[in-house]
Amino acid sequence: MAFMQKKSGNRGAAWVVALLRWFRRHRRPMPWRDGPTPYAVWISEMMLQQTQVATVMPKFAHFVMRFPDVQALAVADEQAVLKAWEGLGYYARARNLHRAARKVVSEFGGQMPCTADGLRALPGIGAYASAAIASIVHGEAVPAVDGNVLRVIARFRGIADDIMRPATRQAIYDFLLPHIRRVNPSYFNQALMELGALVCRPRKPLCGVCPLAKACVARRTQRVDKLPVKSRAKAGPHHDIAMAVVHRRGRWLMARRPAQGLLGGLWEFPQGRRGAGEDHAAAVMRIAREETGLRVRVGLPLPTVKHAFSHFRITVRPMACERAGGRLRRGHAIAELRWVTAEELDALPLTKVARDVARGII
DNA sequence: AAATCGGGGCA
DNA sequence: TGCCCAGATTT
């Protein structure tokens, strides 16, 4: 195949040679890189999106134990996959992974596509992940440009353009392409990412031990702390959330969120935004009535939980409630209502807020 | 091009 | 607190 490259020794540019030598010495062991299989690398790359290596490590071990191969993943039901993903966030990754597994089994006979272009057609695999998997598993010479690589190259080349712009990312990809063709593509991609994680860090980079320091433009021009340039998202608003923790004869009333949108498919205690100027207990009663159909008596407050999402923050004030009448009937913001025991609750895929609240009452 | 989509780690 | 993290998808 044309894209296959043999390890070609030190035929790269001087900075590439230094980079690869540094990588061989300082790379962190990662279980999914140990005799990498397409499935293991795929799972790891999905988990590693916007998630640090240390966070992924235990989750990866548990996930591949629970779903050892693409067939096992394909036949699982989505709630089980979400449960194994619990706590990782960005749950669309888990839903896409599950859809992709079914597609691999139904359309490709259980075989992952071998090329970056082929991988790119699977749900959840975009420009970065397709390049990472194809280079690591099959040695395809295609740059995997993630946040680390953007930062490393923006500094190394003194690029002051906004790295959030597609044109800047393309320019960095174009810069890397001729270099990756000359060396081991798997090592090249991993080395740049590992350098970004360990040395060329966002804050307090370790330029003194950096293998690229000699030719680094940011270092020469004293702009290391100014690069990369990144457009910032504005801080979102804050909401007060009223939550009804309804307990009845050893069971709690839980609600499953709609499959699409924020925290899709996850379970939580019925909740909603408190209106401006609305009394909190009144808000709990209103939300219980609107979302569950029940009339409730509001009891004692449970410990407050704060949580920050990407674009807004919430303060959740859960209140213990008793059913005072009414018939169960789900509101528009709920896909399913269910009375569950403590053990059943523990088996559901929960939001972080729901987990925090549950810990306080069970 | 901009918005949406979590949760953990760190100064 | 604010920023970052081996980003992808939708609008």
Image: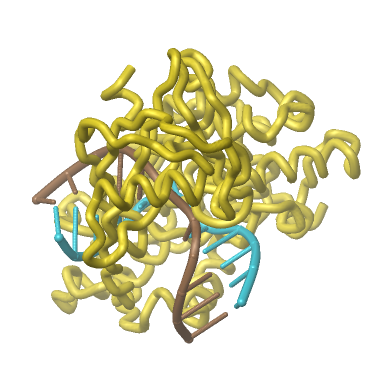
Chain colours: A yellow, B brown, C cyan
Q: Position of residue C3 (x, y in %)?
A: 24, 63
Relative to A141, is A177 above or below?
Answer: below
Of residues A85 and A56, which is closer to you in this image? A85
State left or right for residue A260 relative to residue A157: right
Task: Answer with the quarter of the image where residue A192 lies.
Answer: bottom left
Of residues A220 and A35, which is closer to you in this image? A35
Q: Position of residue A155 (x, y in %)?
A: 29, 70
For this orientation, the residue located farthest to the front is A325
Please indicate, yes or no, whether residue A29 appears anywhere in the rendered image: no
Relative to A86, is A136 above or below?
Answer: below
The residue positioned 64% from the left and 44% from the top of the image is: A95
Q: Position of residue A31 (x, y in %)?
A: 49, 26
Q: Quadrant of the C terminus of chain A?
A: top left
Of residues A95 and A315, which is closer to you in this image? A315
The residue positioned 53% from the left and 45% from the top of the image is: A91
Q: Position of residue A74 (x, y in %)?
A: 77, 32
Relative to A96, is A360 above or below?
Answer: above
The residue positioned 47% from the left and 34% from the top of the image is: A325
State left or right for residue A38 relative to residue A112: left
Please indicate, yes or no, whether residue A201 appears anywhere in the rendered image: yes
